[in-house]
Image (cartoon, helix red, strand yellow):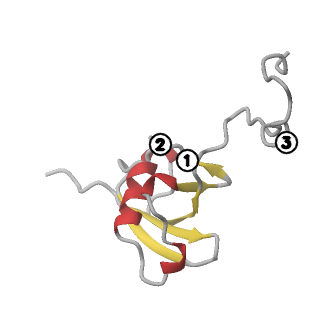
Amino acid sequence: SSEPSEEVHLRLILVSGKTQDFTFSPNDSATDIAKHVFDHWPAGWEEEQVSSPSILRLIFQGRFLHGNVTLGALKLPPGRTTVMHLVARETLPEPNSHGQRNREKTTESNCCLLL
Protein backbone atom coordinates (compact mmCIF):
# COMPACT_ATOMS: atom_id res chain seq x y z
CA SER A 1 0.00 0.00 0.00
CA SER A 2 1.58 3.23 -1.13
CA GLU A 3 1.55 6.25 1.11
CA PRO A 4 -0.99 8.93 0.22
CA SER A 5 0.83 11.64 -1.65
CA GLU A 6 1.99 14.38 0.63
CA GLU A 7 -0.37 17.30 0.93
CA VAL A 8 0.67 20.83 0.14
CA HIS A 9 -0.70 23.52 2.42
CA LEU A 10 -1.12 26.89 0.76
CA ARG A 11 -2.03 30.16 2.39
CA LEU A 12 -3.34 32.47 -0.29
CA ILE A 13 -3.20 36.20 0.29
CA LEU A 14 -5.38 38.65 -1.61
CA VAL A 15 -4.30 42.14 -2.56
CA SER A 16 -6.63 43.34 0.19
CA GLY A 17 -4.63 41.36 2.75
CA LYS A 18 -7.28 38.72 3.42
CA THR A 19 -5.93 35.19 3.69
CA GLN A 20 -7.31 31.70 3.36
CA ASP A 21 -5.64 28.32 3.79
CA PHE A 22 -6.11 25.53 1.26
CA THR A 23 -4.74 22.02 0.88
CA PHE A 24 -3.62 20.70 -2.50
CA SER A 25 -1.60 17.80 -3.85
CA PRO A 26 1.84 18.15 -5.48
CA ASN A 27 0.25 17.23 -8.81
CA ASP A 28 -2.05 20.25 -8.76
CA SER A 29 -1.07 22.95 -11.22
CA ALA A 30 -1.54 26.68 -10.88
CA THR A 31 -4.57 26.36 -13.15
CA ASP A 32 -6.04 23.61 -10.95
CA ILE A 33 -5.55 25.78 -7.88
CA ALA A 34 -7.21 28.78 -9.50
CA LYS A 35 -10.19 26.63 -10.49
CA HIS A 36 -10.49 25.12 -7.01
CA VAL A 37 -10.33 28.50 -5.30
CA PHE A 38 -12.86 29.90 -7.75
CA ASP A 39 -15.22 26.97 -7.13
CA HIS A 40 -14.76 27.17 -3.35
CA TRP A 41 -14.54 30.94 -3.00
CA PRO A 42 -14.12 31.64 0.73
CA ALA A 43 -16.79 33.42 2.70
CA GLY A 44 -15.46 36.86 3.45
CA TRP A 45 -13.84 37.25 0.06
CA GLU A 46 -17.02 38.49 -1.60
CA GLU A 47 -15.56 41.87 -2.45
CA GLU A 48 -12.74 40.20 -4.37
CA GLN A 49 -14.94 37.74 -6.25
CA VAL A 50 -13.89 37.40 -9.89
CA SER A 51 -15.99 36.43 -12.86
CA SER A 52 -13.76 33.67 -14.15
CA PRO A 53 -11.02 31.41 -12.75
CA SER A 54 -8.95 32.08 -15.85
CA ILE A 55 -7.88 35.50 -14.56
CA LEU A 56 -6.77 34.24 -11.15
CA ARG A 57 -2.98 34.24 -10.93
CA LEU A 58 -0.68 32.86 -8.26
CA ILE A 59 2.47 34.70 -7.26
CA PHE A 60 5.14 32.69 -5.48
CA GLN A 61 8.28 34.40 -4.20
CA GLY A 62 7.53 37.42 -6.36
CA ARG A 63 7.03 35.49 -9.59
CA PHE A 64 3.85 34.65 -11.48
CA LEU A 65 3.23 30.94 -11.76
CA HIS A 66 2.26 29.88 -15.24
CA GLY A 67 -0.79 27.68 -15.42
CA ASN A 68 0.91 24.36 -16.06
CA VAL A 69 3.40 24.64 -13.19
CA THR A 70 2.63 22.05 -10.53
CA LEU A 71 3.20 22.49 -6.82
CA GLY A 72 5.54 19.51 -6.89
CA ALA A 73 7.75 21.28 -9.42
CA LEU A 74 8.25 24.17 -7.01
CA LYS A 75 10.10 21.94 -4.53
CA LEU A 76 8.14 23.36 -1.63
CA PRO A 77 9.28 22.40 1.87
CA PRO A 78 7.09 19.51 3.02
CA GLY A 79 4.87 19.94 6.04
CA ARG A 80 5.02 23.70 5.96
CA THR A 81 2.42 26.17 4.85
CA THR A 82 3.52 27.92 1.69
CA VAL A 83 2.34 31.50 1.24
CA MET A 84 1.30 32.66 -2.20
CA HIS A 85 -0.43 35.77 -3.42
CA LEU A 86 -3.63 35.50 -5.42
CA VAL A 87 -4.31 38.29 -7.89
CA ALA A 88 -6.73 38.87 -10.74
CA ARG A 89 -4.84 39.58 -13.93
CA GLU A 90 -6.17 39.25 -17.46
CA THR A 91 -2.75 38.45 -18.89
CA LEU A 92 0.64 37.52 -17.57
CA PRO A 93 3.53 39.83 -18.27
CA GLU A 94 5.68 38.50 -21.07
CA PRO A 95 9.17 37.38 -20.02
CA ASN A 96 10.65 40.11 -22.24
CA SER A 97 7.99 42.53 -21.11
CA HIS A 98 7.30 45.34 -23.53
CA GLY A 99 7.02 48.07 -20.96
CA GLN A 100 6.66 50.61 -23.74
CA ARG A 101 3.55 49.00 -25.19
CA ASN A 102 0.99 51.22 -23.54
CA ARG A 103 2.81 54.51 -23.97
CA GLU A 104 3.70 54.02 -27.62
CA LYS A 105 0.26 53.25 -28.99
CA THR A 106 0.52 56.53 -30.89
CA THR A 107 3.56 55.58 -33.01
CA GLU A 108 2.81 55.25 -36.70
CA SER A 109 4.07 51.70 -37.04
CA ASN A 110 5.49 49.02 -34.81
CA CYS A 111 7.43 47.22 -37.51
CA CYS A 112 10.67 49.06 -37.10
CA LEU A 113 10.96 49.51 -33.33
CA LEU A 114 12.77 46.22 -32.72
CA LEU A 115 16.38 46.46 -33.79
Q: Which mark is residue 53?
A: none
Q: Residue furthest left?
A: 1
Badge 1 density bin: few <14, some 14–19, many ≥20, Cα 10 Å: many
Q: Nearer the viewer, residue 90 or 42?
A: 90
| N-term mark: 1 or 3 | 1
Please name whichever residue, 92 or 19, is drawn nearer the observer in this view of the structure.
92
Q: Is residue 83 above or below residue 109?
A: below
Tag shown at residue 65: 1
Q: Amino acid at mark 1?
A: Leu
How far, Cα to Cα, is label 3 from label 2?
32 Å
Q: Give amino acid for label 2.
A: Val
- Residue 84, image x and y in percent? 57, 62
Label 2: which residue?
69
Q: Is residue 43 left or right of residue 87?
A: left
With 112 as the anchor, is 81 left or right in this view?
left
User: Nearer the observer, disc 3 or disc 2?
Assistant: 3
Q: Earlier in the sequence, mark 3 or mark 2?
A: 2
Secondary element at image label 2 = loop
Quickly name the residue at label 3. 103
Secondary structure at numbered mark 3: loop
Q: Is residue 95 left or right of residue 99?
A: left
Residue at 82% in and 19% down: 114
